[in-house]
Amino acid sequence: MNSQLNLLDRCRIVDLPRIMDPRGNLTFIEAGGHVPFDIRRVYYLYDVPGGASRGGHAHKELSQLMIAMSGSFDVILDDGLTSKRVHLNRSYYGLYICPMVWRELDNFSSGSVCLVLASNHYSESDYYREYADYKAARGLGV
Ligand code: TYD
């Protein structure tokens, strides 16, 4: 692993298509089109209590796209070198997170829903759950 690689530059907002309609707007996501990986799993976070935070881990190989389907929340991305906070509050923006990026989610608004499209099935062995382990794997020491 090249420790100097800035992984946060690879994480980006994906502008999803919008069909505007006075009856209500529509957004769609097509495999192979809007997401820079093959989607193998979909999950969502909901009923998040006020003040709670989620995440607090990195994935070894998993790519993800996060969307605020309802309400809003923040995603803090950290590659061991730098970190940045991304506020998601629109259902037509997806945040692409590449592998090996530490993330935390907080500042959930009441009733918010976080949809996650993922490149693989759930596997606990794909996680770094200790920040020190993650930094070591990035070759950045503790
Ligand atoms: P985790 O990925 O740590 O959640 P978050 O990053 O949103 O805080 O997962 C929380 C728990 O749910 C953990 O015990 C693993 C389980 N889980 C599954 O069984 N399948 C899944 O697809 C996901 C994402 C989690």
Image: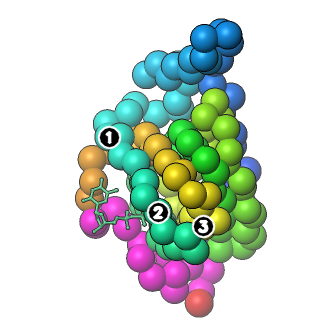
How far from the left and from the top, in percent, is residue 114? 50, 49
The residue that label 1 is drawn on is 41
Q: Which residues are magenta?
A: 124-141
Q: Amino acid at mark 1?
A: Arg
* Alpha carbon separation for disc pair 1 and 3: 22 Å
Q: Residue 97 magenta-drawn?
A: no
Residue at the (42%, 58%) spot, across then down: 47
Q: Quick one: 124 or 24, which is closer to the camera?
A: 24
Numbered label attached to residue 120: none
Q: Is residue 48 above or below residue 139?
A: above
Q: Amino acid at mark 2?
A: Val
Q: Quick one: 98 or 27, which is closer to the camera?
A: 27
The residue that label 3 is drawn on is 106
The residue that label 2 is drawn on is 48
Dot 2 or dot 1, earlier in sequence: 1
Circle 2 residues within 10 Å: few <14, some 14–19, many ≥20: some
Q: Amino acid at mark 3?
A: Asp
Dot 1 or dot 3, earlier in sequence: 1
Q: Quadrant of ligand 1?
A: bottom left
Q: Quick one: 78 or 133, which is closer to the camera?
A: 78
User: Disc 1 vs disc 3: Cβ atoms closer than 8 Å?
Assistant: no
Residue at the (68%, 28%) spot, across then down: 15
Q: Pick the quarter of the image with the N terminus.
A: bottom right
How far from the left and from the top, in percent, is residue 129? 41, 76
